[in-house]
Image (cartoon, rainbow, N blue to C red):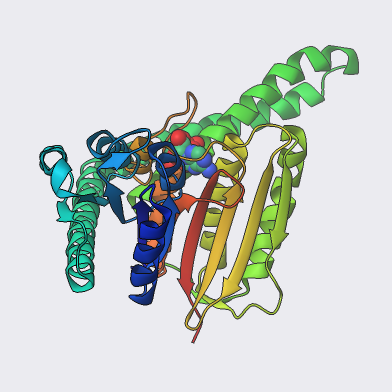
């Protein structure tokens, strides 16, 4: 885990500052809130451990514990209490807080409790991630074989239909010019629909039987440029500003350019679909020591926790016309590259998808 974030909620500014200093000295990132309302606001940015005063000007610690745990299910709350409010603190622990500390707590005791709370948070997060991965794997295995078979069966008649359609189109184009449009128009519509189906079948197959990577050293700026160009018209239609900042100087990543393009396409399309007119979608990349980080940000509504849990599961969608395969394909391709993908709250107010890919040797 990167630097753990501790949220300190206390209306006594001097006390809060003291806690901040102790925790920052121990290497934590600290945010302070002086009331229950402020705490809930700050909590939206995420935290791992909250230190909450039992008595707050606008509510008690038990209620706030429940709210904070709802906002950040993968977090732990530690109550700070005086002797007078010990009962409330005990109630709060019953309601889901990790522990309580009686004020004034010694620095070692405080740090130990935070450390333990953090360990619990990490363990829970790992457990949930494992369970989620197992769930996805199970679903994948169950639908994989069926999908592959079905897609094959669909592909043959689809190819047949597409072929007959070209025959039909050729014959129509030989007819007198004035009788063409009435026939050609529906014909071309059918052709477009068939193309859509072909894409869908392609997606199904890709997901059921991932083909081997044709890997080499890939310049990501070229991949990003291709995607930006392909989706430029789409962005314009949607009145979304698509910007791309992937420097040419970026070291190459190890992978399959075609597959990485699919990753970026799917992420960018999702970002478009989440962003209302007038909004922004931004593609960026930068290099770290042994990897490259590629991010796609949007200014949409972001992703609620209950959706977040299922994001990468095949067939999970919240869209009327979605197949729910986009992100599971992205996930599979990124994993095939030895990379990882994360989703978090982004700087544009909406979602940020962050893909880390290993550098080419
Ligand atoms: N940038 C985003 N902002 C908000 N929600 C998102 C974003 N990206 C994905 N999601 C959520 O994740 C769900 C799954 O995405 P995924 O790409 O797998 O499927 P889909 O977009 O619904 O369908 P499709 O198969 O057409 O891609 C979406 O339905 C949406 O609820
Ligand atoms: Mg999608």
Residue 53 picture location, percent across and down:
28, 47
Rendered view: 207 above or below 150? below
Q: Which quadrant: the N terminus?
A: bottom left
Task: Give the tally of numbered discs.
Answer: 0
* Residue occupying image coordinates x 30% and y 37%: 64
Residue 46 visible in the displayed image: yes
User: Residue 204 falls in which quadrant of the image?
Assistant: top left
Q: Nearer the viewer, residue 224 or 244?
A: 244
Q: Nearer the viewer, residue 250 or 197?
A: 250
Rendered view: 99 above or below 1? above
User: Residue 24 falls in which quadrant of the image?
Assistant: bottom left
174 with respect to 80 (left or right): right
Q: Nearer the viewer, residue 283 or 1?
A: 1
Residue 295 picture location, percent across and down:
56, 59
42 with respect to 59 (left or right): right
Residue 80 picture location, percent across and down:
23, 51
* Residue occupying image coordinates x 18% and y 60%: 123
Residue 201 visible in the displayed image: no
* Residue occupying image coordinates x 63% and y 74%: 219
Q: Nearer the viewer, residue 353 or 143?
A: 353
120 with respect to 12 (left or right): left
Q: Residue furthest bottom?
A: 361
Q: Residue furthest right?
A: 177
* Residue occupying image coordinates x 31% and y 56%: 48
């Amino acid at each position: 885990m990167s630097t753990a974030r501790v949220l300190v909620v206390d209306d006594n500014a001097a006390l809060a500052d003291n806690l901040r200093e102790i925790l920052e000295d121990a290497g934590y990132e600290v945010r302070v809130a002086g009331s229950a309302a402020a705490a809930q606001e700050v909590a939206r940015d995420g935290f791992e451990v909250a230190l909450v005063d039992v008595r707050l000007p606008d509510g008690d610690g038990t209620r706030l514990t429940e709210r904070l745990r709802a906002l950040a299910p993968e977090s732990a709350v530690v109550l700070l209490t005086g002797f007078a409010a010990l009962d409330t603190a005990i109630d709060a622990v019953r309601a889901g807080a990790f522990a309580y500390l009686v004020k004034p707590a010694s620095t070692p005791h405080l740090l130990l409790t935070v450390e333990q709370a953090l360990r619990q948070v990490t363990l829970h997060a790992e457990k949930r991630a494992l369970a989620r991965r197992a769930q996805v794997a199970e679903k994948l295995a169950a639908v994989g074989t069926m999908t592959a078979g079905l897609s094959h069966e669909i592909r043959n008649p689809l190819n047949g239909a597409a072929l007959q359609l070209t025959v039909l189109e050729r014959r129509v184009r030989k007819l007198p010019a004035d009788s063409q449009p009435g026939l050609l128009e529906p014909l071309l519509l059918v052709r477009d629909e068939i193309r859509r189906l072909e894409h869908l079948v392609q997606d199904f197959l890709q997901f059921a039987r991932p083909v081997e990577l044709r890997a080499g050293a890939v310049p990501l700026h070229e991949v990003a440029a291709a995607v930006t160009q392909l989706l430029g018209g789409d962005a314009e239609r949607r009145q979304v500003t698509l910007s791309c900042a992937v420097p040419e100087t970026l070291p190459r990543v190890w992978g399959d350019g075609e597959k990485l393009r699919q990753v970026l396409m799917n992420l960018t399309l999702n970002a478009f679909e989440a962003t209302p007119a007038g909004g922004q979608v931004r593609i960026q990349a930068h290099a770290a020591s042994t990897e490259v980080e590629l991010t796609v940000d949007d200014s949409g509504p972001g992703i609620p926790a209950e959706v977040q849990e299922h994001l990468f599961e095949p067939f999970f969608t919240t869209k009327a016309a979605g197949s729910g395969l986009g992100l599971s394909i992205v996930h599979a391709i990124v994993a095939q590259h030895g990379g990882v993908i994360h989703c978090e709250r982004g700087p544009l107010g909406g979602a940020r998808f962050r893909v880390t890919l290993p550098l080419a040797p």
